[in-house]
Image (cartoon, rainbow, N blue to C red):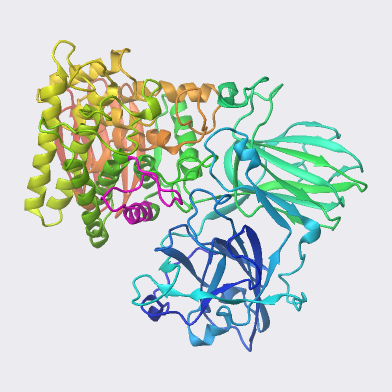
Amino acid sequence: MSTYSFPDLPDANPRLQSHAWSAAWAKYPLGSDVVSAVYLYRCVIELAAVPRHFLIHVTADQRYRLRVNGMPVCWGPARGDLQHWRYETVDIAAFLKPGENVLTATVHFLSADLAPMAQMSTRAAFLCQGDTEAASGVNTPGTWKVLRCDAYAFDRREADALHAYCVIDPSEHFDASRYPWGWESAEFDDSGWEAATRAGTAAPYGLANAETAWWLVRRGIPAMEETPQRFAGLARSSGVVVPAGWPNSPVGSPLILPANTRAVLLFDSGVETTAFPRLIVSGGAGAHLRLAYSESLLDPGAPPHDYWLAKGQRDKIADRTLRGYADTWLLDGGADRTLNTLWWRTFRFAELTIETADQPITLQDISSVYTGYPFDEKARFTAPEVEDLADILAVGWRTARLCAHETYMDCPYYEQLQYAGDTRIQCLVSYYVSGDHRLWRNALQQLDDSRITDGLTQSRYPSRVPQIIAPFSLWYVCMIHDYGLHVADDVPFLRSLLRGARGVLEWFEARLRPDGLLGPLDWWNFVDWCDAWPMGVPPGVQEGGSAILTLQFSLACRAFAELLAGNDDPNGAKRWAGVAGGAAGAVWRHCFDAERGLIADTAEKRTYSQHANILALLADAVPVTVADRSRLMERVLSDGSLTQATFYFRFYLNRALIQAGLGDRYLETLGPWREMLRLGLTTWAEKPEPTRSDCHAWSSAPNYEFLATVLGVVPDAPGFARVRIAPYIGSLTSVQGTVPHPRGEVSVALRRTGDTLQADITLPSTIDGVFVWRGVTRELRGGRSSLEISAEAA
């Protein structure tokens, strides 16, 4: 497990930010450095005494795990691209001792045919730089020695056999007889290892005339959490008699399999998780272990391609099978061998198949180490009248956490890619629950880094294969606006993103037709996973005239105008507000069907969707009274002939409810989440059944809605400098909660008796705000306020 937290280190050598490093990238000197391989690096340094601080800077292409004197320190690097290659700064003083000290790094590199889609890299290399001259003994290549470890092999056969878009790390195959056990100790004989050689200059981003393959940028996020965890239990077994309660009762009690035995053990984690598997075994030379992972079991006769049709009841185990990718280990017969993987896995169910050879094997333990971004759950929400709201929150937060690691990601089992459309929702969920904006900031920076020459952001980033979803660039602009509203004291960073946001909008503006609607659009114009839309693309995109895309463009223009207004550019704000209004007005003129009282998907008025009408409300394209907007929204909710929003786009449906004055209807819309609970899911699915992914954080919007809609806590000024509390509690009579805020926290307790609402509000002492309920507005001052509002006053 990693023991490091990456605290801020303001005293790190500033010269490393502006000059070439004295260390250089190091490599294994023999053979190709672009094929899949694992490299073991060792460095021994002598210390007369342990200094108070011993800062080093470390990174690798692609991944490394660093230990000092056998103790795990950190792993990385945090993912980026070659122009923004992250490195970690760590203080290893606590791991050092007087005399001989050993630094070791396990570095692995995967070739282009095996690397995960989220991994961008060039060739295998390792870099370590002492912060000062006194620490320069750790500089690479220096005295570092390296071994190419032939114990590892990789393939994608089982992932490919899923016949799904599965682009994560490959399966790992480990031969224990080829591994140099004990290599991390000072006593290990490395005389047969090669001296590491120079692989290239180490230089910070922006340095003039530096010829380097990796422009170095300091890591901006904390170390990933690593927490040991146990399986909920053994679901079933065959081929061996398993003691009751094993492997958890008692923990560490061994399971012995005789020679020439085949056993299959199915473990249930109880809930889905992202974790490093961990097995401890002794003996069993020649035994073969295979651990397969799956989000769900399948009904008998699951089809080979569309296997997700057979997922069914997720917590049902009897007569069901596991299909998923797997890792394998070939044992050498040694004692107390700890077996794990280089990269974490996603699973609720894990199936261990053991085939022994001529020796028995002792399986001492099997468990895992949870990993993910170290969000701290600070928000609280309780509504005692409806018990399953707590379940919805718990499952939603688990989903959000499993989809947040070194970047946000769409699904941890299949892709592990940071998509802008997903990420906008994920940022709001994680920020409202934790108050931590660092991963949000990281996402904005990476998406800005992804921009192609014509101005659009890539749909997902980092990604070694470029992909453009043009509407996701628009949600990216809205994500910048969200950040400006919620996060305090980061104006320079916010302003650094405005040029890129303008480029996105100018790309779309250039494609406006004379009638004010968007014309034909290049790239993939995914909007939502609706069954009626091929690849999620609505009508009117290819030929031009899409109301949905034009309205989304209008929303992004308005968000950008507000950003400019808050950043001393009133002329720019006026210009883009005008573009936003023009696009919204064009949709109303050409796509409103007066007979049906709905916005059509195109001016031809052949198809209709919830999406077009949701976005029309949000973009103020419906120039009518609040009552008329309410009637339009009621049609959106009740007309089953409309193309329906799936889990992803229900985030925008909920925004439209509030815009239409129907926020109190929000709690009535939770039926799809209750259905997922009934099906036994422990994380939220990507889309309604049947679904490929059982863990997709864009479906965790209720964790935001309970706090921002039901409790009603939202910003009333940029940087959350004022708070607006406008609760929509529906039929609830009692609800309370706390939302983290840049200056502390906002606490809300509401009690409704008949038509009277009592509210106890606590704001950070330096923040003012406003409370709004049924049209009544009351000013709030920092600290505690108690209010009573009657419906008669409204």
Q: Is residue 147 left or right of residue 632?
A: right
Give the vertical position of 108 relative to 302 (above or below).
below
Residue 380 position in % (x across, y down): 40, 41
**How many numbered dots are placed on residues in this image?**
0
User: Which residue is at the far top?
Assistant: 595
Give the vertical position of 104 relative to 278 (above or below).
below
Compare residues 289 and 547 and report the one nearer the observer.
547
Q: Name the chief secondary structure element in magenta.
A: loop
Compare residues 736 and 547 and report the one nearer the observer.
547
Q: Is residue 764 left or right of residue 37?
A: left
Please report the residue visible at 53 percent of the width from the left and 72 percent of the height from the top.
Answer: 127
Compare residues 764 and 4 and report the one nearer the observer.
4
Q: Is residue 408 left or right of residue 636?
A: right
Residue 693 position in % (x across, y down): 51, 33
User: Which residue is at the far bottom?
Assistant: 48
Q: Is residue 770 left or right of residue 53?
A: left
Q: Quadrant of the N terminus?
A: bottom right
User: Is residue 696 among the parts visible in the rendering?
Assistant: yes
Q: Dividing the picture into quarters, in which one does residue 623 lie?
A: top left
User: Is residue 792 among the parts visible in the rendering?
Assistant: no
Q: Quadrant of the C terminus?
A: top left
Question: Is-magenta flag for residue 534?
Answer: no
What segment carries the magenta color? 440-469
Question: Is-magenta flag for residue 445?
Answer: yes
Please report the residue visible at 38 percent of the width from the left and 79 percent of the height from the top.
Answer: 14
Residue 511 position in % (x across, y down): 18, 39
Give the vertical position of 148 relative to 534 (above or below).
below
Q: Dividing the picture into quarters, in which one does residue 583 lie?
A: top left
Please report the residue visible at 25 percent of the width from the left and 46 percent of the height from the top.
Answer: 477
Compare residues 277 and 327 and report the one nearer the observer.
327
Residue 206 position in % (x across, y down): 34, 71
